[in-house]
Structure formats: C-alpha cells, structure tokens
Image (cartoon, grey):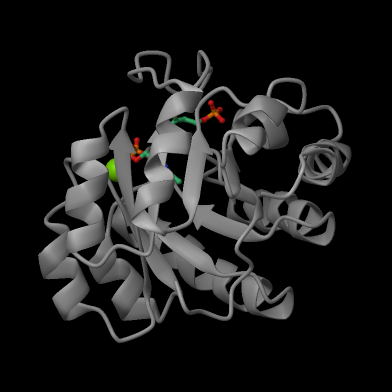
Amino acid sequence: MNSPWPRSGVYAITPDENDTTQLLARVQTVLQAGAAWLQYRNKTADGPLREHQATQLLPLCRAWRVPLIINDDWRLAAAIGADGTHLGEDDGELVAARAALPAGTILGASCYADLTLARRAAAAGADYVAFGAFYPSPTKPHARRATPDLLRDAAQFGLPRVAIGGITPDNALPLVQAGADLIAVISGVFDAPDPAAAVRAYLSCFKEAPTP
Ligand SMILES: Cc1ncc(COP(=O)(O)OP(=O)(O)O)c(N)n1
Ligand SMILES: Cc1ncsc1CCOP(=O)(O)O
Ligand SMILES: [Mg+2]
C-alpha cells in the first residue's frame, strides 16, 4: 500500500457505544496513547446515529493524524469523506467498492482463516487483508478461528496483514512475530481498566518482535 498511513501498530476498533460524548472521549484517550488506526464499528446504532458518530470521529482522527475506517458501509465512508472502509463477507463486493471509492481510500477486507479470500481481496484491490479470530473473542464469541501460520503465508500478497480476535497485550507477540502489521482490538483496549496503558502495552510487542 502506497499511502501516508502507518504500516504497523494498534488498529483500535470502537465498541458499541451509543453515547456519542462517551464515544469521543474514549476514542480520544486511545488515540492520544498511540493507536495508529481507528475503525468505527457500531452494531447497535441505527443509520442516522452511525452517520452522526462517524462524522464526529473524523475531526478527532484528523487531529491525531489517524485514518478513520468505517466498518461494513463503504457508502457511508464515501459520504463523510472517511479515510477508508472495512468489508467482510456480508458487506458487499470489494470490486464494486474499489470502483466507487475515491482513489486513495483504504479498502480493508476480512479473510477470516482463508488464503483464497486473501488472494481474491488482493486481486480486487484491497489495501490490507485481515485474518482472525486468533483467540476467543469476547466481542464476537462465534467468530471462526485462525492460526498464526496464515499470517506467515499471507506475506505472499505484499499487503499489510491485520490480526483480529481476542487479542490482548499478553497474547499479541506471537502474532506480531508471525507477521501481523496491525493488531486490531476492541475489548482488549476499550474494556481495559486503563485503555491508554493497554495501547502502550500492545505497542511494546512491536518493539519486542524482531523486524523481518
Ligand atoms: C480489521 C477488521 N478485521 C475483521 C473485521 C470483521 O469484519 P466482518 O467479518 O465483516 O465482521 P463485523 O466486524 O462486521 O462484525 C473487522 N471489522 N475489522
Ligand atoms: C469483528 C471481529 N471479527 C473477528 S473477531 C472480532 C471482534 C474483535 O473484538 P475483540 O478484540 O474484543 O476480540
Ligand atoms: Mg462486517
């Protein structure tokens, strides 16, 4: 990906927070602590609230020079001028989103535990490939499971590799060592007693892992 955004670090994903003031305060803490990317994900808000919250997050992300990625809905991403969108298997065709989005918009793709999906995503013009869940996820307990070997094998696509699912500061290191560029986290950051300390703890895994 030839882009101005950091290629590695903590990819924080918002929890289902319908109080927008709270959401902004929680995200501010996490960005200040050093999260590199932010995804707006809210599975409980209706359309107008999602648009409102995404719009409110944009200047905050701009202030911290962090890309704002909109989960599930590339049309919302385009409508508010977000930096990107993340699409899973139920979120529409990657090719259609790629064609419709302005040049430079980040397009992320869920590949679960499947290298064939990653190959297709790369061919469709995705900017990163996401795998997981690597561990039992409190947020998505029934998510299918992936193993670190997938991250190694996915190096062939030459795209940033994102790892997700039940990742904590204590279990992130093997994923970074296996090639994860971005560690995507919801509960490990936002449900932590001290979310800023949690972000810093994830970041220490990147310092610990030898650079490839
Ligand atoms: C970075 C990242 N990776 C994976 C997902 C999961 O996307 P999806 O499978 O569409 O599931 P939902 O998030 O929509 O429940 C993600 N959002 N972000
Ligand atoms: C969206 C998603 N896709 C696979 S696991 C997951 C949830 C990640 O949340 P957590 O970091 O709390 O496990
Ligand atoms: Mg989705």
| Residue furthest bottom in the image | 103
Task: Give the side of residue 54 with respect to residue 100, left or right.
Answer: right
Residue 56 vs 167, above or below: the answer is below
Q: Quadrant of ligand 1?
A: top left
Task: Give the side of residue 129 with respect to residue 2, left or right.
Answer: left
Q: Residue 42: x percent and y percent?
A: 43, 44
Please name the residue shown 69% across and 21% down the image.
Answer: 171
Q: Residue 18: x percent and y percent?
A: 52, 45
Please name the residue shown 69% across and 36% down the image.
Answer: 190
Q: Residue 55: x percent and y percent?
A: 48, 72
Q: Residue 14: x percent and y percent?
A: 56, 46
Task: Give the side of residue 171 with respect to residue 155, left or right.
Answer: right
Number of disc labels? 0
Residue 77 vs 182, above or below: the answer is below
Q: Depth check: 171 or 187 in front?
A: 171
Please name the residue shown 17% across and 51% down the image.
Answer: 120
Q: Depth check: 194 or 87 in front?
A: 87
Q: Residue 100: tell me if it is visible.
A: yes
Q: Depth check: 108 or 119 in front?
A: 119
Q: Residue 71: tell me if it is visible.
A: no
Q: Depth check: 73 or 96 in front?
A: 96
Rendered image quadrant of residue 50: bottom left
Residue 79 vs 109, above or below: the answer is below
Rendered image quadrant of residue 121: bottom left
**Quadrant location, the N terminus:** bottom left
Task: Give the side of residue 16 with respect to residue 23, left or right.
Answer: left
